[in-house]
Amino acid sequence: MKKELTRQQYLDLYYYMRLNRAVEDTMVKLFRQNKIVGGLYSSLGQEAISVGSAYALEKKDWLAPMIRNIGALLVKGVPPRDIFMQHMAKYDSPTKGKDGTSHFGDLDHRHIVSPISMLGDLIPVMTGVAMAGRYLGQKIVAMTWIGDGGSSTGVFHEGLNFAATQKAPFVLILENNLWAYSTPVRKQVPLEDLANRAKAYGIDSYIVDGNDVVAMYSTAKEAVERARGGQGPILIEAKTFRRLGHAQHDPAEYVPKEMRAHWEARDPITLYEKYLAGEKLLDAKNKKEMEDKIEALLGKEREFAENSPMPPAELAEEGVYCTGDDCHKIRAKWERPIAEVTPPKSSVAAVWTVPGFGSGKGSGGTNAPIHFGDAPVSAEKSAGARKPGAKILTKSAAKKTVKAEAASASRKARR
Amino acid sequence: MAVTKGARTNGAGTSEATVGGAQVTFLEAIRQAMFEEMERDAAVVLLGEDVGVYGGAFKTSEGLLARFGWERVMDTPISESAIIGAACGMSYLGLRPIVEMQFIDFIVCAFNQITNFVAKGHYLWNAPAPMVIRGPSGGGVHGGPFHSANPEMYFVHTPGLKVIYPSTPYDAKGLLKAAVRDNNPVLFFEHKFLYRRIKGEIPAGDYTVPIGKAVVRREGKHLTILSYAAMMHTSLEAADALAKEGIEAEVIDLRTLLPLDEETILQSVKKTNKCLVVHEDTKTGGIAGEIAAILCEKAFGDLDGPLLRVTSLDTPVPYAPTLEDHFLPNAKKVFTAAKELARY
């Protein structure tokens, strides 16, 4: 399935990538002026992943960003001021100064779940979001991101396994930026393609060029709609590179020069500009207009953020518990008849009926389904038959095969 | 431990021999609470290991799958972090999940998910996670070092959680219902020694017991014994023996450990001027230490003697009956400590 984008969609992707980079550039300035209280993490060179994948979601869908997914927040409509104020620990920030970075969410309106620093925790949480959405009949998809480093945590595997057993409408973007702090991916994972993690859970996966925003969007879109259609969770490995250190304090001298040069030549925004120009979707005038728009917006947003006060000290004592009815306004939003899940309609015979399970016929893992209601599936259609790497887009900015790129990057990483 | 009947008074301060009620086991009270809450609200779901077809390792969820179906009673993989993480995610869409830990010992497998993700959500980003994490806890049944734990204090030390540890069928049902309706994550410990050993009257119809309120189980004037869960019954047994020697112990069931009902504790200690804390949790870092600090801060002038504590030993829970009996507090140890305290 290849989805042609409208001109507006092509330009949206460009706008959000530019905005993502400009927001982070602004924060680097704020950091150097000592206006950012804690750490500053960069997604330089990874903007196409955040933007392309989040852009594939519908308004009702849920996402949970990691620290390098500011682009996803912007696509979901979070104003840049919120991101600035979070980093500056300001009172008007979404967490009122109680936490920094992109550690904030919005349950009510934008359907954003906040990350925490412990990697992988969002995977079961978003699985639960996906399950609840299905239970309520909302037809939503839940999406989160994880890095190459985070894919080694226990909860990554617990979460993905649970999502798979539940066939949850969940999409996981694995950003393989080749480095977990100072440790290269080769030292973390004995796999060339992290998409192969999916095989362990019998779910489908894709490999995509993470520096190609159209490929990223198109792959994510396909995955999102397949998940929404009840085909279960999907893992997308986006091959990319972390251009800066783990955070601002880290000069990343451990990264080989050739590796950095290779990826700097593949900047996702530069690549996309060339593509847009070639397709006559963007000219110098449009580009200038967009740059002016972003500059004006961020000027205002930054001013607002800088003028926001620090939180009053007493705020530290507030909000540990939700007390009273006002602090919990979320009610289950039913989009299916409740009668379906209440007795007598919900009542069942509490016995396992597992066609073919344990009969020996399923030794190949193909015709012994253990999900209730599953029809036996044929070997060709079983999960995992879709080969990673199959998703290569003809209209994408970079036309080389994704695999070759990634392999050369990994070879450099091994040195 | 001679546990014959439930406690003498319930949380409402009335006799448990309520007219129209029924004698049920501690376990049945818990099952009823879940059943009734799921009946009341389709947002309430149950997930955990073997909670569905099998009805839970201790049969606390027996019959729930048959009644409410596969979407609401979910058998999960052995993945405590995933179970609790998923329940948290469900709560964000307005569901009220109940999570069963097959044995509460396994709750530590999800320690990060509970203490970092679930507990901090409301404080940090205004995301309450109403959910109940419940499971069988405690020793005395020769379950060995990995099926006998009392891990309540790991979580009492975590702001954002509520921690309940009931001792009677009446409280178990009423507190579990209150926990399901609470807008915060609540940990609900069920002492497995009590599951089928004690019975109590519970009234017909819906009721809740307020979270964060202790209750006086026996009135007395010579000293206060603070306890909870199975040790509540041990303390009452000791109080009977003490009464025969003319020592009237006031026995208080804490019921909720977080938030702790300081008011009830202080009220009693200011009357008796002596305090003994009895818990099955190990000694160092147990709730007795916290209570001692509270009394030093708020009732130092009222104390006529030291705060004493009768607790399990500072060791893992050993398996052999001879070892476990030595490890656990019992009525005799409580009696001895209380007599020593009464001398002041």
Image (cartoon, coloured by chain):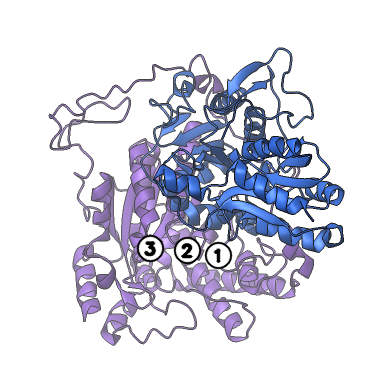
Colour in which the image shows chain A: purple
The chain to which mark 1 is attached is: A
Nearer to me, A149 or B132: B132
Q: Amino acid at mark 3?
A: Gly
As drawn, the residue found furthest toward the front would be B245
The local crowd at label 1, few if under 14, some if 14 to 19, many if 20 or more residues have their Cα within 10 Å, is many
Q: Identify which residue is drawn at 60% across, 54% down.
A: B121
Please tell me whether mark 3 or mark 2 is closer to you in this view: 3
Residue B1 in picture, x, y percent from top left: 56, 35
Task: Please report whichever mark, 2 or 1, sits nearer to the chain's N-terminal start.
Answer: 2
Q: Amino acid at mark 1?
A: Ser
Q: Is residue B5 above or below residue A157?
A: above
Callout 2 touching callout 1 (CB < 8 Å): yes
Task: Please report whichever mark, 3 or 2, sits nearer to the chain's N-terminal start.
Answer: 2
The local crowd at label 2, few if under 14, some if 14 to 19, many if 20 or more residues have their Cα within 10 Å, is many
Marks 2 and 1 sit apart, C-alpha to C-alpha, by 8 Å
Q: Disc number at residue A150?
A: 3
Q: Is residue A59 above or below residue A361?
A: below
Q: Is residue B230 left or right of residue B249?
A: left
Q: Secondary structure at mark 1?
A: loop
Chain drawn blue in the picture: B
Reading the image, the residue beneath label 2 is: A69
